Image (spheres, helix red, strand yellow):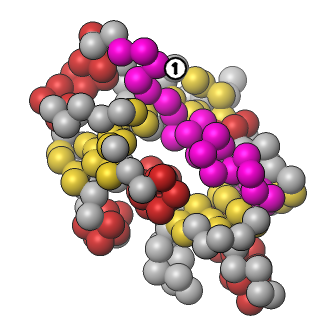
Amino acid sequence: KHIYIIGIAGTFMEGLARLALLETGYSVSGCNHHIYPPMSDQLVELGAKVVPNFLAERLSLQPELYIISNIAKLSMPVIEAIFNRHLPFPYISGPEWLYHHILKDRRVLAVTGSMEKTTMTSALTWILDYAGFSSSFLIGGILENFQVSSRLPPNNYFAIEADEYDTAFFDKRSKFVHYHPDILIINNLEYDHADIFP
């Protein structure tokens, strides 16, 4: 089976691709406009097939599901091609997929705030690991202690950088709305993302 991720080279979506491979056993491929390290290196290591640009021809693999990131726009040829196929619910946002396939059965620790989410989530993950909990995580960067942006060991704890930016063009709510955390850490709150929040 095959999952296709539109916007796969973003920090969140690369981490999601890693989790999809580990959790579901699906093969993963995707497209992105700009593909560069460190996420491009991580995707090569995963064996995910990644192609540049958002052209309709990128969909020739006929996946079972499209995961669409928030960089995708309705006017992109690859998105128009998905809608023109009229498949029964062929797409989902990354945060929604993450909740239904991974988070809903785990104890979620979410880190929010205007700044330092990556740093705080990294510290939280290392604290949990050092304390013997070996937590799963998804973070918007490569952790120096683990050399990956996500992992999924067999345990009940999941630390996540809970980004407040929008989910997708078809879901303008913040990504963190989907995570339903058991524990929430709020770093700081400042006026930010004026393009999303009035």
Q: In which quarter of the image is residue 38?
A: bottom left
**Vertical comparison of 74 with 109: above or below:** above
**Vertical comparison of 63 with 28: above or below:** above
**Vertical comparison of 8 with 116: above or below:** above
Q: Is residue 153 left or right of residue 123?
A: left
Could you tell me residue 25's position as x and y percent? Answer: 42, 56
| Extent of the magenta region | 87-116
Could you tell me residue 48's position as x and y percent? Answer: 28, 57
Q: Quadrant of the C terminus?
A: top right
Camera-side residue of 3 and 73: 3
Q: In which quarter of the image is the N terminus?
A: top left
Camera-side residue of 108 and 33: 108
Q: Residue at x 67, y 59 (%)?
A: 160
Helix, strand or loop at label 1? It is loop
Q: Can you identify the residue that label 1 sits on?
A: 170
**Classed neighbour count for the residue bearing mark 1: other residues with Cα under 10 Å, few (<14), some (14–19), many (≥20):** some
Q: Quadrant of residue 129?
A: bottom right
Q: Residue at x 32, y 43 (%)?
A: 2
Camera-side residue of 169 and 198: 169
Let me know if residue 100 is in the magenta part.
yes
Q: Is residue 20 left or right of residue 48?
A: right
Could you tell me residue 132's position as x and y percent? Answer: 77, 87
From this viewpoint, is residue 37 visible?
no
From this viewpoint, is residue 161 visible?
yes
Q: In which quarter of the image is residue 97?
A: top right
Let me know if residue 156 is in the magenta part.
no
Q: Residue at x 55, y 69 (%)?
A: 151
Q: Which residue is drawn at 58% across and 61% down?
A: 138
- The amino acid pointed to by label 1 is Phe
**Vertical comparison of 29 with 127: above or below:** above
